[in-house]
């Protein structure tokens, strides 16, 4: 594959024998945009058309999914009263970041059609800025959602964050996303450049200057390590809290000689601990899937064997974080019982069948008081 | 002679199984607790070879339903007692007079049942929610239910299941006791000699809901500071054992500068009157109320009493206590001094004069309310049943009179 690698000539011959003329990456770039292409990419052949087409179709699918999923979240969470809680604002914020990431999709499709970054320097910078803000914003929002859940579950009576605190968190997520997307934009520290099939843009992880290495290292810690540690710590503490709480309740039930201690109305056998562990693991894995490819590619590009980063490999992280932005609404919102109920009510054609609470034990609240009183009768009993 | 006895009745959605209950309030007398006694009527053709099972369950809800995420439920249901009601397992069961009456009246398809509350079971308490929160109420709630099945562990069908919310309450002992709770504190100051001493005495140890709490405050100022103002609170202390949380809320308060400043060398004796009332704390988040089935008989949660020889630490559910808190403001440099005097706030025991008086008050209030707010109930479809019931009840009240 390499034109100027360690064994250039052999691979050149082997690969090219069947495919006709060999064109290097970036040959399709107009002359005025040629300076955008990092020398690294020129060492690779133009990608076969079917790979490009595959990514093209993949991105179209992702775009539709993301618009649909995040749009639904935005619509339903902002219009239904039962979902108006402080915690849900974070979910809304995540959907906004995800939609923000989605705005890059049309640009990508345009780039992929013509074979270069439309808009040149500015186009590339805008594309990468969008991606940077939405990516880093989404990852830190994930971390805050984890923290908020820990607060809510560990102290259900009055522990949940207030509207004010949540708004601060949301402002913080936007501030968090700003520095490492704006600095390269103005080329103050780091810079943006095309990557992959030269149809997407991201920060430069290939230039081997000390300055740039430090940049990659910092952004790695900032947008990957810190949010991940927050997520891990929050869910771990949440899990241990639930475990001790379950034990405590069982202990209290024992005082009353009660063996059966069920979370009411839900008759599934899975223990609370297991359910929490499962949900937390899914969210954590989602984060890992989204951001590990980018981190690995960036770290290899900066500190390892640059030759390993082929255009195809460097397209994958981009695909990974974009697909996660489509999955977010399904993981966060769709696991939300109230949201499912609302979806079922408004869009019955989606075929969501939420288990309605069986009457057992859950007959509480105003409605049952009313109905119970309605059934109360005065009867005369003769003495 | 016809004596009207009120009976609570509720049927399954398909109307085949019906609960009859003489009352919905069950009193914990500390040494024993009223059993839940009632009668179930079943259509034998419907039952065929199946059985009717009954359960007494308590539901702890310790978090808002809207905050439930990740499959966590902020509620736990404890089945305290379970029994096969039809066919009867214990043919020699002793019936209470109410059950005997009901069985006689309802005929051969009536089956009596009795559930016992286990020792240490908590009282029904509701934690008030803010404003228009329509979720399920937080607190401790009791439900009895009956369902038709082949065996106890069978899947229960909604249409052949009936459940009814009941209350478990504690009443004040007949004797209110002679002890007058009091507390004495004194405070010295860092840069000056002398002390201010504060003594607070209540006129009773046990108060009934709606009664005036009289706190006599004696301040003698032997310091060089002066007391600028006096604040008086009634504090409700709520301990929620389900989540190991506790908090305190002021349910009545008063601040005065009358007789102030209390200058060095001066003394003051003054009595403050405060009434802790649920009505004055409407829509305040986290105020504990006694379990209530209708909106009009809301009162603040009664103090939790435990059997002699046991500490409140053993109690489960929601543990309530009250105190009067007096705060003296000794100026910006002097700071504040405060003391708490605990007391009990309880329901009068039935049979006492106070009970009759409070019942009469309640009745009057409820009649008035129904006259005034009839229009309100017509707004809402869900409440139509309620209104019908209210009318019916009003008629009964009138008949009783």
Image (cartoon, coloured by chain):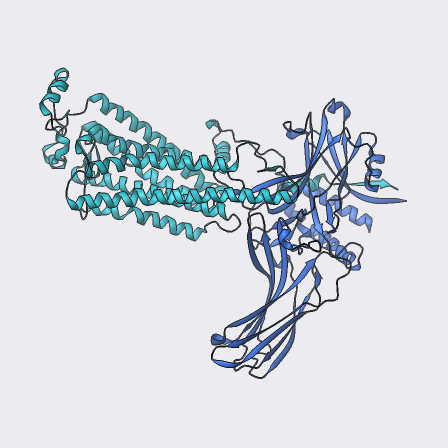
Chain colours: A cyan, B blue
Work out which residue is located at the far top of the displayed protein and give it: A18
A297, B141: nearer the viewer? A297
Q: Can the viewer see residue B384?
A: no
Residue at the spot 34% in from the left edge and 36% down from the top edge:
A288
Residue at the spot 47% in from the left edge and 76% down from the top edge:
B333
Q: Is residue B34 left or right of residue B74?
A: right
Q: Is residue B202 left or right of residue B137?
A: right
Work out which residue is located at the far right of the displayed protein and give it: B1
Give the x, y percent position of residue A85.
47, 46
Work out which residue is located at the far bottom of the displayed protein and give it: B265
The C terminus of chain A appears in which quarter of the rendering? top right
Residue A14 lies in quadrant: top left
A261, B163: nearer the viewer? A261
The N terminus of chain A appears in which quarter of the rendering? top left
Give the x, y percent position of residue B17.
73, 31
Residue A362 lies in quadrant: top right
Q: Is residue A329 above or below residue B204?
A: above
Work out which residue is located at the far front of the displayed protein and give it: B309
Give the x, y percent position of residue A100.
31, 39
Q: Can the viewer see residue B341?
A: yes
Q: Is residue A113 left or right of residue A356?
A: left
> What is the tally of numbered marks visible in this picture?
0
Give the x, y percent position of residue B363.
75, 53
Residue B110 lies in quadrant: top right
Residue at the spot 45% in from the left edge and 34% down from the top edge:
A278
């Amino acid at each position: 594959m390499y034109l100027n690698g360690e064994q250039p000539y052999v691979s050149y011959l082997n690969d090219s024998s069947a495919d006709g003329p060999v064109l290097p990456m970036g040959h399709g770039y107009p002359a005025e945009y040629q300076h955008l292409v990092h020398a690294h990419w020129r060492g690779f052949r133009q990608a076969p058309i079917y790979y490009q087409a595959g990514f093209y179709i993949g991105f179209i699918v992702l775009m539709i999914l993301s618009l649909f999923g995040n749009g639904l979240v935005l619509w339903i969470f902002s219009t239904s009263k039962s979902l108006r809680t402080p915690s849900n604002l974070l979910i809304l914020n995540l959907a906004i970041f995800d939609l923000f990431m989605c705005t890059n999709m049309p640009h990508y499709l345009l780039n992929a059609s013509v074979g270069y970054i439309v808009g040149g320097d500015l186009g590339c910078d805008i594309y990468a800025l969008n991606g940077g803000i939405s990516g880093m914003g989404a990852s830190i929002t994930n971390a805050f959602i984890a923290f908020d859940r820990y607060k809510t579950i560990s102290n259900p009576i009055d522990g949940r964050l207030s509207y004010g605190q949540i708004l601060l968190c949301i402002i913080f997520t936007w501030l968090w996303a700003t520095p490492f997307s704006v600095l390269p934009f103005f080329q103050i520290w780091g810079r943006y450049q095309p990557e992959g099939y030269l149809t997407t843009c991201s920060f430069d992880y290939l230039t081997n200057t000390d300055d740039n290495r430090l940049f990659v290292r910092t952004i790695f810690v900032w947008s990957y390590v810190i949010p991940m540690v927050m997520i891990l710590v929050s869910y771990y503490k949440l899990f241990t809290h639930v475990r001790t709480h379950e034990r405590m309740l069982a202990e209290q039930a024992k005082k009353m000689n009660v063996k059966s201690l069920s979370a009411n109305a839900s008759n599934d056998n899975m223990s609370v601990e297991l359910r929490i562990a499962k949900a937390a693991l899914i969210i954590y894995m989602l984060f890992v899937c989204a951001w590990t490819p980018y981190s690995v590619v960036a770290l290899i590009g900066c500190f390892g064997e640059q030759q390993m980063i082929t255009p195809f490999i460097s397209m994958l992280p981009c695909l990974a974080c974009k697909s996660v932005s489509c999955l977010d609404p399904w993981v966060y919102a769709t696991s939300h019982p109230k949201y499912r109920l609302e979806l079922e009510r408004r869009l019955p054609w989606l075929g969501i069948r939420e288990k309605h609470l069986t009457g057992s034990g859950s007959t509480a609240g105003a409605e049952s008081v009313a109905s119970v009183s309605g059934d109360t009768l005065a009867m005369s009993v003769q003495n | 002679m016809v004596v009207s006895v009120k009976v609570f009745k509720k049927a399954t959605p398909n109307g085949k199984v019906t609960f009859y209950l003489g009352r919905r309030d069950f009193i914990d007398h500390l040494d024993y607790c009223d059993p839940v006694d009632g009668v179930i009527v079943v259509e034998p053709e419907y039952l065929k070879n199946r059985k009717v099972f009954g359960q007494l369950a308590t539901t702890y809800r310790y978090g808002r339903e809207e905050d439930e995420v990740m499959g966590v439920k902020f509620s736990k249901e404890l089945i305290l007692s379970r029994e096969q009601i039809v066919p009867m397992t214990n043919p020699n069961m002793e019936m209470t007079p109410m059950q005997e009456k009901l069985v006689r009246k309802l005929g051969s398809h009536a089956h009596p049942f009795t559930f016992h509350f286990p020792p240490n079971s908590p009282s029904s308490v509701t934690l008030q929610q803010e404003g228009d929160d329509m979720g399920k109420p937080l607190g401790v709630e009791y439900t009895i239910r009956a369902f038709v099945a082949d065996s106890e562990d069978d899947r229960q069908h909604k249409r052949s299941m009936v459940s009814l919310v009941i209350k478990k309450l504690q009443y004040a002992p007949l004797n209110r006791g002679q002890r007058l709770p009091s507390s004495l504190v004194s405070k010295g100051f860092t840069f000056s000699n002398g002390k201010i001493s504060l003594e607070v005495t209540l006129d009773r140890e046990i108060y009934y809901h709606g009664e005036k709490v009289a706190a006599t405050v004696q301040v003698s100022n032997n310091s060089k500071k002066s007391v600028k103002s006096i604040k008086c609170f009634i504090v409700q202390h709520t301990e929620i054992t389900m989540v190991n949380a506790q908090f305190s809320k002021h349910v009545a308060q008063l601040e005065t500068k009358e007789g102030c400043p209390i200058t060095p060398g001066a003394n003051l004796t003054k009595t403050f009157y405060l009434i802790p009332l649920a009505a004055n704390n409407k829509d305040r988040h986290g105020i504990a109320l006694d379990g209530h089935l209708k909106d009009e008989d809301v009162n603040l949660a009664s103090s939790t009493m435990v059997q002699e020889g046991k500490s409140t630490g053993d109690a489960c559910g929601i543990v309530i206590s009250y105190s009067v808190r007096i705060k003296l403001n000794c100026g910006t440099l002097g700071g504040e001094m405060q003391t708490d005097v605990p007391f009990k706030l309880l329901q009068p025991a039935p049979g006492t004069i106070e009970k009759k008086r409070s019942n009469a008050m309640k009745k009057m209030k409820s009649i008035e309310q129904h006259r005034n707010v009839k229009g309100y109930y017509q707004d809402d479809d869900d409440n139509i049943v309620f209104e019908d019931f209210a009318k019916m009840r009003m008629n009964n009240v009138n008949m009783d009179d």
